[in-house]
Amino acid sequence: MAWVASISFVLLVLGVPIAFALGLAGTFGIWQFGIPPQVIITRFFGGVDSFIFLAVPFYILAAELMNISGITNRIVRATSLLVGRVPGGTAYTNITASVLFAGVSGSAVADASALGRFFLKVMPEEGYTPEYAAAVTASSSIVGPIIPPSGLAIIMAAVSGLSIVDLFLAGVIPGLIMGLACIAVVFITAMTRGLPKSAIKVERSQMPRLLLESAIVAILPIVIVGGMVTGAFTATEGGGIAVFVALVLGLVIFRSLSIADIWQAVVVSTRVTATIYFLVAAAAILSYALNLLGISGFVSAMVPFFGGDPTLFLIGVVVLMLILGMFLDIGAALIIFVPLLMPTIMQLGIDPIQAAMVIMLTLAMGLITPPFGVVLFVLMKIGNIGLAPLFKALLPFIIAQLAAIVLLVLVPELSTWLPDLLN
């Protein structure tokens, strides 16, 4: 078992694409048992043979259409009206825009890329250091995979058997708490060291239309989740509706979409979807190999180490996921480890929805931590910033968000209250 994991890690260090590293390591593990190669192919395609995964391309396409429609600029200007008039106003605007943008994109990388191009230009002009501007953008961007509609929740539902609707609902409060953790860091910085006021200007005549457009965008995830809660449509149908609404907003309301833009969105979303499916399929091979090698028994044998304490076990899961998130793609980590952990989680009486939120949030932290934090690399390229100064500026935000995750461990209701209420 250890040597299979070692092969995967060595391939990653050598720069082999993640999907190939996982698939090759899993293949070697399966061959050890003399299993026919046909089984590997079956596992590869079986990894994505789930009706739930049909929802993925719809939400990616909807997010891409909304982004091309110029929604980023509208969200930024609208949030600046609400929180931009105080010291640190643009930093607050950055975080608030990330939370709103999360309901559109569902992706931390898309969030960081779209908002980073704006804020890494504007914030240094106001007096922020480029590193601090990037740190605010990076830390708030990981709300993207948590607040619905969330592609990460779709993968979690597929591998855990949990309801997509419950996971969408459960992500609202934890996502907001992560955003509030970032706001707390900015507030403390503004009080102790001082931060400049916002220089983002909005003409008075533009305010009504800007607020109306932003309200329409903010309502979109509410409509999608609300429709699923009431049973009006499934998660996959909700994705189709999201695409339709995105087209209406871009073509009719914003009037900023062209046929060329739509084609570009289709091409980009197709590539992203193919990448996700390939990664999921490869991770399924490694997961099967690890199961053959007895990793399930190893996980079960670890339970007595925690003395049967659910809280202590969840803290152990946080540490494990934090380490895994530094090296593995989130989707791959979910596919490989969630099926292994869920039986123990149920055995200890932990609410699976709470555990799912803790796992997803902790893995999302891997996007902003070295050595393979994808969001860090995106912002380093946009702002021409070094890794060391960026991570130094990011450290207070990471500490605050880890504290928020510990709060979710200690208070299960923060994850389960909303799904329980609406069910």
Image (spheres, rainbow, N blue to C red):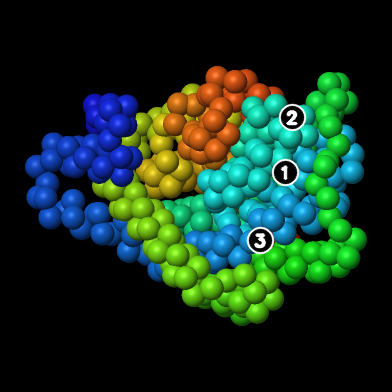
Cβ atoms under marks 1 and 2 closer than 8 Å: no
Q: Position of residue 232 (x, y in %)?
A: 61, 80
**Looking at the image, is mark 1 or mark 2 nearer the viewer?**
2
Query: In the picture shown, does residue 308 fall above or below 215?
Result: above
Reply above or below: 81 against 59.
above
Query: Is residue 307 in view?
Result: no
Q: Between disc 3 and disc 1, whose residue precedes?
A: 3
Say which residue label 1 marks. Answer: 94
Q: Residue at x 83, y 50 (%)?
A: 201
Percent position (x, y) of residue 347? 50, 43
What is the spatial separation of the Cα atoms under label 2 and label 3, in whole angstroms? 24 Å
Check disc 3 and report the residue beneath it.
71
Q: Quadrant of the N terminus?
A: top left
Report the residue marked by disc 2. Answer: 128
Q: Locate the C terminus and report the quarter of the image it occupies.
A: bottom right
In the rendered structure, which disc, 2 or 3, sits on the residue that comes first in sequence? 3
Residue 207's disc is none
Q: What is the crowding at mark 3: few (fewer than 14 residues within 10 Å), some, or many (at least 20)? A: many
Which of the pair 54/217 is nearer the observer? 217
Q: Amino acid at mark 3?
A: Ile
Quarter of the image where one finds residue 224: bottom right
